Amino acid sequence: MNIKLTILSIFLYFAGLSQVEFTASVNYNQVAINEVFTYEILSNQGSCQIYQPEFGGLTIVGGPYQSSSSSVMIVNGKRTQNKQIKYTYQLRGTKKGSYTIKPAQMKCGTETHKTEPITVKVSMGNESQTNAAPTTNKDFYIRISSSKSTVYQGEPFVVSLKMYSKKQPRGIEQMEFGEANGISKKDLNPNKQNYDTKQEIINGVRYYTVVLKQELCYAHKSGDLSIEPYYLSALFNKGFFQQYRQEGYSNTLKIKVKDLPANQPKNFNGLVGEFELDFNLNKNKVKSGEAIDLNITISGKGNLNSFDDPVLDLPKDFDQFDPDIKNNVKTTSSGTSGSISYDFVLVPTFYGDYNIPAYSFSYFDLNSKQYKTLSTGAFKIEVEKPDNAHGEIITQKKEVDIDETDIRYIHKNDQSTFSNSDIKAGSFIHYIGLGFPFLMLWIILFMKKRQNNLSDEDRIKLIKKKAKKSASKYLVDCKQLQKQGKDADAIKELSAGLKAFLKFKLNLTESDLSAKSIERYLTDEATKSKFLSVWNTIEMYQYSPVDANQIDILIQDTEVLINTIDKQL
Amino acid sequence: MKHLILFISLSTCISGFNQTLIEKGNTAYEKELYDIAVQNYMEAVSDEQKSANLFYNLGNAFFKSNELGEAIWAYEQAHKINPADQDVIFNLEFANALTVDKLTSESKGIGSWLTRNIFSYSPNFWFYISIIAGLITVVCLYFFFTPGSHLINNLSLFLSTLFGFILIASFTFSVLHKTRLTSTSKVVIIEPNAKILVTPTIESETSFELHEGAQLDIKSTQDEWYEVQLNHNSGWILKDEVWVY
């Protein structure tokens, strides 16, 4: 920051004109041996008796020289007279050491006034400069100071720039402000043109002092922060028409900034101070399409400027317009204070009961040193159907906002797992499972094909093999019938059995089944005669009644015959 | 034939011990004790047991305990087992969006469509399909080879050809699916940042640097090193700095 200031007039006046002023001062409080310095007693009471103090071993070189001045001021018709008496002594120390000038006394009737004692250090030659505190004995120096040395983050404090000079300043030429990392500064009097000059006695030395700048500061970060030196050049009178310049840098100001406690609420954004939240809803029962006025006012003391505009978490069926903001925040040396008011207009577009979640914010309370949360509280708005429409006031389809801000939740339904060994693909089982049906198919088809490819002879052989089997069926039936006494039927079965056997065995057709044609196949004579006797007996028995014993013999004979023929052919 | 039915009816075995571990993990996750959830899920995984849901839940637990690389690894595993799960895809994209390195590994189009539709079934799905297709083919062939009416012959020829193709396709898919599930071809970086070196030695020069969550293809492996590839760049990375999937 570099502000060039043209020469500004400085009005000089003395504060507290009506009060008793009685002060003593030296022009240097650190001097070399035999160096002459000045001691002054100043009083604004002309009628009082002033007693010279004890100089504690210092030698009076000259004085006291008395001088007095008086001035008359008429402001708005009011006349004030100002009188000043000054006693000047010239002193010197002859030995090295610390000397104390005792208080001077002034008696005004019964009242006694005393000045402060002054300590003067007398040292060898140049030593005075090296041992001296850097600022105490200069003709001109500037300082910056803070109203608080330890602050919380966001807590306001005031930094003042003050100039000290032994001569009365004529004007300010230039000011530069040092950087302050992590601290935001706000000039309390940005358009200051006139500076008040005061007189102060510091360690017995009289200085003209001017407060050049006051800044309201907030720290943004914690730790030991520092404000870099400020630069100032001022002009002084030399004689009547000449001016000379004095310039210098101030000290570096250290500020210790404490971090806010760690348990910050979620809706905390750095507000520090004392606040109040005022919330007002003009109605909570409306028809859809009607407007609702909602007012949120934040008032209090603290860094209101860092307050974030409230965002209402409204249902989608509410039209919300940008709030009307009334900012009434003032900055004073005690910090910013005031109120910010937000007027929202809400228009429900659909009927129903809506719960509006609370709007809340948190701040750090400097008095109780803890976080506090202010909330509007959740509230309910009842929206009724409009009179004209049947609730069908939606003119266009609304888009459903889907904004996933987090990963999706875990799956809890299916917890079955598998391992690599559970995978059957490409395994032995897989090949067996695929190959086995095909192998079976091949075997089945092969078998069938073999059956189809048999020659006639083979087929006859196969039928012949079956011949005895088919005959035995008839014989079993025959035996059963015979036991039941149905002789005629038994003989019929026996005949059918023998014929069936011969038909299959000799591969004959039904018409060929005669004794003569069968005879030809039988090569063995014994068998031939046996066959003829059995055949004829069966023929005969079919038409004439016979004894049961004879049927038994016949059945046995037939069985023997079948066995014999079967073996022979 | 009875043997075949027996083979088919063999279902995937489910380990009861694993299920309690997963349930423990789920309970811990619900209580927002993500470290404990990770522990339980990892124990279940280390038992050679896996499922899309288990890896998905593990990924969520890793994600919630701010282990981005491990979370991506688990999501990728889940994606491998079930490429059609939308939740897995969403969370994987969500996690990938938080990685430092923006790598273009989007695979959309016919390849990903095939992957989604072929490999999203249970691990033995194509095995069963191939067995069933085999049986139907055999039955159709039987009818084809047995003398019968003209219609039956033609129909059985058509069906046996159709199911023959299904058999070949499902057998191929089953083998490919097994390969997909049992082999590993990629790595994900789990260290906050990792150097990809020019040669597999500690003193080697750095080829390029990547951060947690970046995914690379494995080209080859040597001792404690992987040779990895990203787009057309390749280099060597320590096995300790990555997890394979």
Image: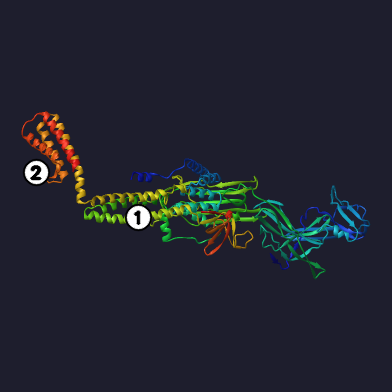
> Which residue is more in the foreground, A96 or A39?
A96
Answer with the quarter of the image where residue A168 lies.
Answer: bottom right
**Spot occupied by residue B65 in the image (x, y as percentages of width and height):** 55, 49
The mark total stands at 2
Q: Write down the residue under mark 1.
A: B166
- Disc 1 on helix, strand or loop? helix
Amino acid on which disc 2 is placed: Lys
**Spot occupied by residue B200 in the image (x, y as percentages of width and height):** 60, 60
Circle 2 marks a residue in which chain?
A
> Which residue is more in the foreground, A94 or A206?
A94
Category of crowding for the residue at label 2, using alpha-carbon neighbours closer than 10 angstroms: few (below 14), some (14–19), many (at least 20) = few
Category of crowding for the residue at label 1, using alpha-carbon neighbours closer than 10 angstroms: few (below 14), some (14–19), many (at least 20) = some
**Spot occupied by residue A535 in the image (x, y as percentages of width and height):** 10, 38
Q: Residue furthest left?
A: A544
Q: Write down the residue under mark 2.
A: A516
Colour pattern: rainbow
Q: Residue at x 24, y 50 (%)?
A: A451
